[in-house]
Image (cartoon, rainbow, N blue to C red):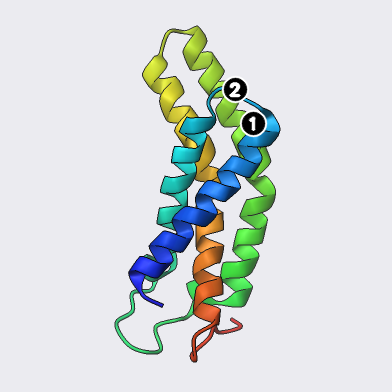
Amino acid sequence: MNRVAHENTGIICGAAASLGLAYQDDRADLLLEILGGLLGGWLGGRLPDLLEPATHPDHRAIFHSLTVGGGGNAAAISKVPQWQADLRARARECTAAGDHWGALLMNLLVGVVAGLPAGYVSHLVLDSTTPKSLPIL
């Protein structure tokens, strides 16, 4: 897959993940969380190739593997709700203290933590459909 495909798919998956988790919370900061999800999805969609640049046809190693890439993301995804709760609490603290820029940043990060692993997984799924596929380890 090419970079644009990874970025666009990561953005879509990141936005969907952040929207799904924000919708459950039913908050007014939904737009900021979705924007954070877009950013996190974009970064997650690029991350495997940033960690293992495509300098040769066999560039896929540990960060593209089903075991490490997939397993590591599964572990991260299980932590996302707690990370989001912590960031939302920080956003409320910032708002109460009059730090509106801090609250904005925290609400964006709520989306980023949902979007980044979704984007990363989308990268692995796309790469698994190519003739080289993905290494197991």
Counting from the top left corner in percent of width and height, residue 111 is at 52, 40
Which label belongs to residue 85? 1
Q: Residues within 10 Å of mark 2 (few under 14, many from 20)?
A: some
Residue at 60 percent across and 35 percent down: it is 84
Q: Which amino acid type is shown beneath numbered disc 2?
A: Ala
79, 122: nearer the viewer: 122
32 with respect to 118 (left or right): left
Secondary element at image label 2:
helix
Q: Badges 2 and 1: C-beta atoms under 8 Å apart?
A: yes
Q: Which amino acid type is shown beneath numbered disc 1?
A: Ala
122, 91: nearer the viewer: 122
Residue at 49 percent across and 90 percent down: it is 132
Quarter occupied by the C terminus: bottom right
Which label belongs to residue 29? none
Q: Is residue 117 above or below residue 69?
A: above
Looking at the rendering, which quadrant does residue 25 occupy?
Answer: top right
Looking at the rendering, which quadrant does residue 99 occupy?
Answer: top left
The mark tally for this picture is 2
Residue at label 2?
89
Is residue 46 visible in this depiction of the protein?
no
